[in-house]
Amino acid sequence: MLTVTAPATSANLGSGFDVFGVAFDRPLDVVRVERAPETTIEVSGVGSQYIPTDPAKNTAGVVAQELGTPARIVIDKGVRPSSGLGSSAASAAAAAVALSELYDTDHTREDLVWVAAEGEAAVSGSAHADNVAPAIMGGFTVVREDGVESVDAKVPLVACLPETVVSTREARGVLPSTVDLSTMTETVGNAATLTIGMHRNDPELIGQGMAESTVTPARAALIDGYERAVEAATAAGATGVTVSGAGPALLAVTHQGDQRAVAGAMVDAFESIDIDARTFSTMIGSGATVH
Ligand code: HSE
């Protein structure tokens, strides 16, 4: 069977709501495919009991339908569903790259971002390409209505996933529908600062540019222990901390050498209020990889 891996991702990075994304180097979803008369889905791994195997309801199945590439699709989940770490995007991204390779379609990686986003839309109800873009293209990505840009960056990250459930639907439901002009100006300034930071591999600029005062506070209120974890991570050396995607995971940016301290500080902060948490220390990584 043809095997493709695709990584966990973090969307938004604070100031880039529905626009920015980064690929991790782990955890990963592993998707294996072989040609078949009709599409079937098998799922194992972390949280697999929550993943539908009906191809019409599974992101990878919808991708196969969109591409016209029926296949036996075997998914080994490494990215926990409903985590804020792009779980459904990882499966959709790996499936899109795998099926395109299997049937030798002439889609570019950018084409496959929009195919995988359709897979996400069919399953979650809303198409956000800000997780599938880094899962397919790797690095730091910027998604617009009609295009996607990516750039490699070498920056240490710590993702912290508390044992808390926040649905994307709930996390979008708490957002205001408008922002005022001064807030917009502040957010654009921060997003631009973050983008320069990615080009310079500068964790200080990236951390400053993650600041955002509309989406992040609304969602932080859904995550018990959020403020405590941010304070602890910052004291341990994080240059910026925000909600990863729709949450409940948090994303911290650090200098090289500070990841272990930042990860430990966040776990301790959650454990101090009896919430288990696990962390992933990673660099900004590559996108989907054919093995
Ligand atoms: N940008 C999306 C959000 C990512 O924050 O709601 C999660 O789908």
Image (spheres, rainbow, N blue to C red):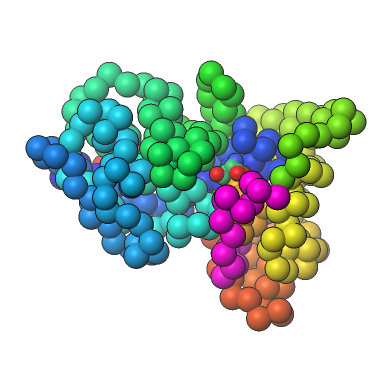
Q: Nearer the viewer, residue 268 or 107?
A: 107
Q: Nearer the viewer, residue 39 or 155?
A: 39
**What is the quadrant of residue 123 in the picture?**
top left
Whether 53 is among the magenta residues is no
* The quarter of the picture showing ligand 1: top right
Q: Residue at 39% across / 58% down in the picture?
A: 78
Q: Residue at 74% across / 60% down in the picture?
A: 221
> Image quadrant for the N terminus?
top left
**What is the quadrant of residue 136 in the picture?**
top left
**What is the quadrant of residue 273 in the picture?**
bottom right
Residue 148: image location, x then y, percent: 53, 24
Any part of residue 158 in sight: no
Q: Is residue 221 above or below residue 213?
A: below
Residue 135: image location, x then y, percent: 45, 40
Q: Is residue 227 above or below residue 147?
A: below
Q: Is residue 147 left or right of residue 220?
A: left
Q: Is residue 67 above or below residue 74?
A: above
Residue stretch rendered in magenta on the structure: 159-174
Residue 14: image location, x then y, percent: 71, 43
Q: Is residue 256 left or right of residue 7?
A: right
Any part of residue 36 in sight: yes
Q: Is residue 61 left or right of residue 221?
A: left
Q: Residue at 40% across / 52% down in the picture?
A: 28
Residue 244: image location, x then y, percent: 62, 51
